């Protein structure tokens, strides 16, 4: 009888405890606005531990409550607790009004934590959902430049500028993006500027395929072939149909003076399962780099006539390229076609002169507001390089400046 009574009391205690827990949870959720105000007040005053304590129970009973997750992440960031901030921000759902802001903070936290691959994924997804996000686009742009992926960085900016052509943006944002585009084309960071960042990121988080390939690219550009080799081959083995890894590994063997190995990598070696030969090269053949590498392979074998054909294919895909014109000139010179070589050299020098003028002008306009006439000057230089999109947008910017009251346009 006594044991039965004890059991009943125990059951009642458990039920009462459970009820109290549920009631406390309801109270915590119902008082969420008050909790958030107190926590935010503590955070503003720098009392971060008190702010965190204030949020503790709200996060316990409402683990996916966007405002509390957002505030907790801000507290984490102020305390440099990047893993905790990342964890909080990842739990803010797409249906929340805070999602756009949270994703921007998440990308910043990932970049600060040197999770470059994860940050790129977050930023790319963010721009699909919020294509006019200037901050996210500039973050992705900067990441790509740090990984020496200038072509992709330029594409990121051009996508935004195409959007702005049909859906007008502020003058200051357009100028900012045009400056960034010019920077990526004419003031891109040098490999030695990126080496420390890439080494640190890869050593800290090894499972980063893009960062690994970027570090291999950096070593290759610096001529550190021994350091580049394992990284490039790992990247190629991991994704044998990754054209970027294939191009870079091919370039590595060209630098080593082995055109046969370079060609086997570029086209795929049917005798090597790991190389995954590409039977349909139609996609590769649309990329000018494919033909430029074939040119260098042929040149390494002293097959100068074939090399000339290959560089002509590259130039047909990417015309008005000073490097391609200079290579054409050298190959024509080797074939004793002096008059044609001189024309190619002249054209290469003209393109180099236009790029140098743009380099100087874009550097100057990067620190002050442009005048309408200067916008036209930039547009003409871009046109001489066959770049119609930035030319049109600089000309449009010049027209806007001409009719607008003088004011500072940029930050």
Image (spheres, helix red, strand yellow):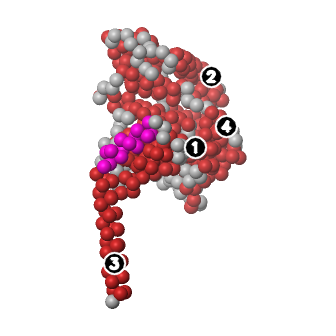
Residue at the spot of label 2: 338
Q: What is the CA distance from the residue labelled 4 to the residue labelled 3?
A: 77 Å
Q: Earlier in the sequence, mark 4 or mark 3?
A: 3
Q: What is the CA distance from the residue labelled 2 to the residue labelled 4?
A: 33 Å
Q: Secondary structure at mark 2?
A: helix
Seen in the picture, residue 173 relative to 237 is either above or below; the reply is above
Q: Earlier in the sequence, mark 4 or mark 1?
A: 1
* Numbered label attached to residue 298: none
Residue at the spot of label 1: 214
Q: What is the CA distance from the residue labelled 3 to the residue labelled 1?
A: 66 Å
Q: CB atoms at circles 4 and 1 under 8 Å apart?
A: no
Q: Secondary structure at mark 1?
A: helix
Q: Residues within 10 Å of mark 2 (few under 14, many from 20)?
A: some
Q: CB atoms at circles 2 and 4 under 8 Å apart?
A: no
**Mark 2, mark 4: which one is toward the viewer?**
4
**Residue 206 appears in view:** yes
Residue at the spot of label 3: 9
Residue at the spot of label 4: 222
Q: Earlier in the sequence, mark 2 or mark 1?
A: 1
Q: Earlier in the sequence, mark 3 or mark 2?
A: 3
């Amino acid at each position: 009888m006594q044991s039965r009574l004890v059991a009943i009391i125990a059951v009642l205690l458990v039920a009462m405890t459970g009820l109290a827990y549920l009631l406390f949870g309801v109270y915590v959720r119902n008082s969420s606005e008050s909790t958030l105000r107190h926590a935010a007040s503590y955070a503003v005053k720098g009392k971060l531990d008190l702010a965190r304590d204030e949020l503790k129970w709200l996060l316990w009973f409402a683990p996916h409550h966007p405002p509390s997750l957002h505030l907790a992440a801000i507290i984490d960031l102020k305390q440099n607790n990047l893993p905790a901030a990342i964890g909080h921000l990842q739990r803010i759902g797409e249906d929340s009004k805070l999602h756009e802001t949270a994703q921007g903070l998440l990308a910043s936290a990932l970049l600060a934590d040197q999770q470059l691959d994860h940050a790129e994924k977050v930023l790319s997804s963010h721009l699909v959902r919020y294509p006019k996000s200037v901050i996210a686009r500039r973050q992705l742009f900067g990441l790509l430049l740090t990984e020496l992926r200038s072509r992709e960085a330029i594409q990121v900016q051009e996508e935004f500028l195409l959007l702005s052509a049909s859906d007008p943006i502020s003058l200051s944002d357009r100028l900012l993006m045009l400056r960034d585009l010019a920077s990526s084309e004419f003031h891109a960071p040098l490999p030695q500027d990126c080496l420390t960042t890439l080494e640190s990121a890869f050593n800290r988080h090894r499972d980063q395929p893009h960062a690994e390939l970027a570090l291999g690219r950096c070593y290759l550009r610096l001529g550190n072939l021994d350091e580049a080799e394992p990284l490039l081959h790992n990247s190629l083995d991991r994704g044998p149909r990754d054209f970027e890894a294939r191009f870079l590994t091919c370039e590595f063997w060209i630098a080593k003076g082995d055109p046969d190995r370079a060609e086997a990598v570029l086209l795929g070696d049917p005798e090597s399962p790991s190389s995954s030969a590409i039977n349909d090269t139609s996609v590769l053949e649309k990329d000018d780099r494919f033909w430029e590498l074939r040119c260098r392979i042929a040149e390494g074998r002293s097959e100068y006539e074939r090399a000339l054909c290959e560089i002509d294919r590259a130039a047909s895909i990417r015309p008005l390229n000073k490097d391609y014109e200079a290579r054409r000139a050298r190959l024509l010179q080797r074939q004793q076609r002096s008059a044609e070589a001189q024309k190619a050299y002249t054209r290469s020098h003209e393109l180099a002169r236009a790029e140098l003028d743009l380099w100087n002008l874009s550097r100057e306009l990067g620190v002050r507001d442009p005048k309408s006439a200067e916008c036209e000057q930039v547009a003409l230089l871009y046109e001489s390089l066959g770049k119609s999109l930035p030319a049109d947008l600089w000309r449009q910017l010049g027209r806007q400046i001409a009719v607008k009251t003088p004011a500072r346009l940029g930050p």
